[in-house]
Image (cartoon, rainbow, N blue to C red):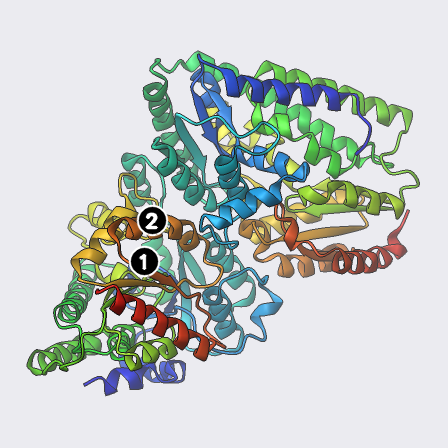
Amino acid sequence: MFAFFHETLKDPLSRLADLRRNSGRPLIGVTPAYFPREWIHAAGGLPVSFWGAALPLSRADALLPPSCCPVSRSILEIELAGLTAELSGWVFTSLCDTLVNLREIFRGVSLRPTLVFPIPLASDPDCRRARLAALIPEVFEKLARMTGKAVTPDALAAAGRLYGDIRMLQRRLYETRRSRPRLIGARDFYAAIQADFFLDPAEYRLRLEALLDELANAAEQKELRAPQIFLSGMIAPPADVLVLLDRLGMPVVDDDFANGGRSVSRPVFSPEDPVGSLVQTLFGGRPCPCLHVPGIDRAAVFAATVRECGAHGVLFLPVRCCEPDAFERPVLNAALAAEGIPALTLEMEFESLPQESLRSRLEAFRDLLEESGR
Amino acid sequence: MTRLASFTRMKELMTLHYLEAKTTKEKPIIWLTSGAPVEYVVAAGALPVYPENYAAMCAAGHQALRLLEAAEAEGYSPDICSYARTDFGQDLLRGGPAGGLPPPCALVCATNICRTVVKWFEAVARKYRVPLFVVDLPFLHDGLTRDAVAYALRQFEALAGFLAERTGRPFERERLFAAVALSRETTALWRKTLDLCRRRPAPITALDAFVHIAPIVTLRGTAACRDYYEALFREIEGRVERGEAAVPQERYRALWDNLPIWDRMRWLESFFAERGLAIAAATYPNSWAGIDAAAAGSNDPLEALAVSYLRLYIHSGFAQRAETLVRLIEEFSLTGFIMHSNRSCKPYSVGMYGLREEVSRRTGVPGVVIEADHNDPRQFTEARTITALEAFIESMEPLAG
């Protein structure tokens, strides 16, 4: 069922030329996170999302200090290594201080144009809305310069429908996992979600529909009573970790990754109410530590989400040096402790993950959850 | 540090400030970030308190380590800014020179120094259950825009309403204009003071500037602050007139980019002085060096204020940063520049390696990057720093005075 998605993620950069040719659209690299991809599609482009990769960092280290996260380092490495020659441009948001400066580095080293969509953080909702209203036409204009095609209301509506369909299908996949946690392994599940980064959305939609049909008829494995876990962090972990979870029989019921549950829970942009829908696209859905949303208690939302999905424990998988994520871990841990939900933190790198140590810690965590009767 | 009579006055000012903050019954305490428009807080009759300034005081007094460790024991990762960790630690232990900061009734933070402050102040807001007002000042990738100024001004208006609500008093615009006028005078004096280091020999060094930054960060918008910088300027001007040098036998003149290494100020001062190196300029103290009405293209003092808070060095694109560095190197007749790659300050440090190459190429003067942290002494490796700085000083020899 998942072979196509795994195949898509096997060396996806080598297939960018085919993607460009087959789609007939200029490819636009999207860095983390929350840039409305439907805008790119409406401008005649095809978004390709980059969330970091496991590759040796030989060039990026000359430009980034050791305190930068592996996501930014590997995205820069991909660019410097010439692996993105098929891209016509890059888009950034102002998600964190590192990414704001990474865009500046790209301007110096990349031959391709870059644009930034600065996500407003103002406390005052009217100020936010006014800012977004000013930003939308500005970003559309810059996108049009990148792709050579203006964003029209019709194209925006069509792109909104396409990406809206995808979002709904991904939500169905999440719901399927929540209701039948032993049906889909972690590695398979995230392959199905992440294939979205490197496929033509029309094809991805079809593949996802077919997958959901197959899953509806598939039988759930009759597994032992293994504890169910919730994954948390900025991005889904490398496949090695997911394989380990599958091997240890620890079904994942949900997550709040920026490239997973957090994005999937957000509505897509709608041209009928551009500012209102953009507010929802950015600040609705599961809270992200990179965005300031007044009045939202992320720890309370997080604990409620974990409780409602039936997870017995939480596995925090923070990316090394991700400051926004690190700030909130104590309060999330405290919220879980108040609910009596055990948690384990395993810091993530893309490369040289200590497999044996990871396995030992995960086994110990599973045993703890089993012993505690959860 | 250079022996300045003003130092005593500065200590008095800061002591009085923290004393007032710890004892006041009348003034609501509002915690701010260093790039927030404090003039509004002063005008609202509240007392501003800066955790950044306090964290720096803790580190300069070699008291930060145990506070950092206390925060880490609470689960705060060493990946988090060391100012924030020091602040969390002082709160847990009531530590530092003032025995901890007074609790806030509200928080105001601005994103012009980093986005980290939002996460930091969110944590404080949770702890004290007080409201947080975020002034979002957009990063200027391509220079100032009218939209950015309008966005800032709109938020300033909302801030006035927020403060009125928190203090329970109507916000008086006359008081705001008075505070802005005082800030304008003060920042102009600070600019003039820093510019005195264009002279050879430099009458003070940037290490002195880092120390004397405390009042302008903490007390901007008050007459006491303006008077202090008036006196400081006169004193340093006197040193220039008498030809007094901060570094005897000044041979080299360099720029310091990024925050200082607070825990190592004395060590660095001795190291540089022994080798005849005067740190004659720095980018960081310039952050509070001018409310430029001309730059705003307007006579409106609030617009000028908005522009001054938007146009910070670390809040600008790299092309602008390179221009600033090149200009400072030329105007201050510098023979080199030192870039502190600061583990705790990503806005300053990410991209620094590339900037060093560009600025060296454009100016012909050498630059060096040293890895450390502004508040975490564990990130400083003395031997590695000595090796890097000695090689750097040697590379300046052909340009030495």
* Nearer the observer, A160 or B269: B269
Q: Give the percent coordinates (x, y) of residue B31.
A: 46, 29
Disc 1 marks which amino acid? Tyr
Element marked by disc 2: helix
Q: Quadrant of residue A151?
A: bottom left
Vertical comparison of B273 with A58: above or below: above
Vertical comparison of B219 with B203: above or below: above
Q: How many numbered badges does the structure rendering display?
A: 2
Residue to which mark 2 is pinned:
A334
Vertical comparison of A151 with A17: above or below: above
Q: Give the percent coordinates (x, y) of residue A181.
A: 17, 72
Element marked by disc 1: loop
- Please give left or right for residue B382 compared with residue A35 in the image: right
Residue to which mark 1 is pinned:
A34
- Observer-side mark, 1 or 2, equals 2
Residue lying furthest left in this view?
A217
Q: Give the percent coordinates (x, y) of residue A163.
A: 20, 65
Disc 2 marks which amino acid? Ala
| First along the sequence among labels 1 and 2 | 1
- Please give left or right for residue A225 compared with residue A23 in the image: left
- Please give left or right for residue B305 compared with residue A191 in the image: right
* Nearer the observer, A301 or A100: A301
Q: Residue at x 34, y 47 (%)?
A: A135
Q: Chain of mark 2?
A: A
* Nearer the observer, A147 or B158: B158
**What crowding class fits label 2: few (fewer than 14 Cα within 10 Å), some (14-19), or many (20 or more)?**
some
**What crowding class fits label 1: few (fewer than 14 Cα within 10 Å), some (14-19), or many (20 or more)?**
many
Residue A365 shows in this picture: yes
Q: Residue at x 27, y 40 (%)?
A: A129
Q: Quadrant of the N terminus of chain A?
A: bottom left
Q: Give the percent coordinates (x, y) of residue B245.
A: 88, 33
* Residue A218: mark in rendering: none
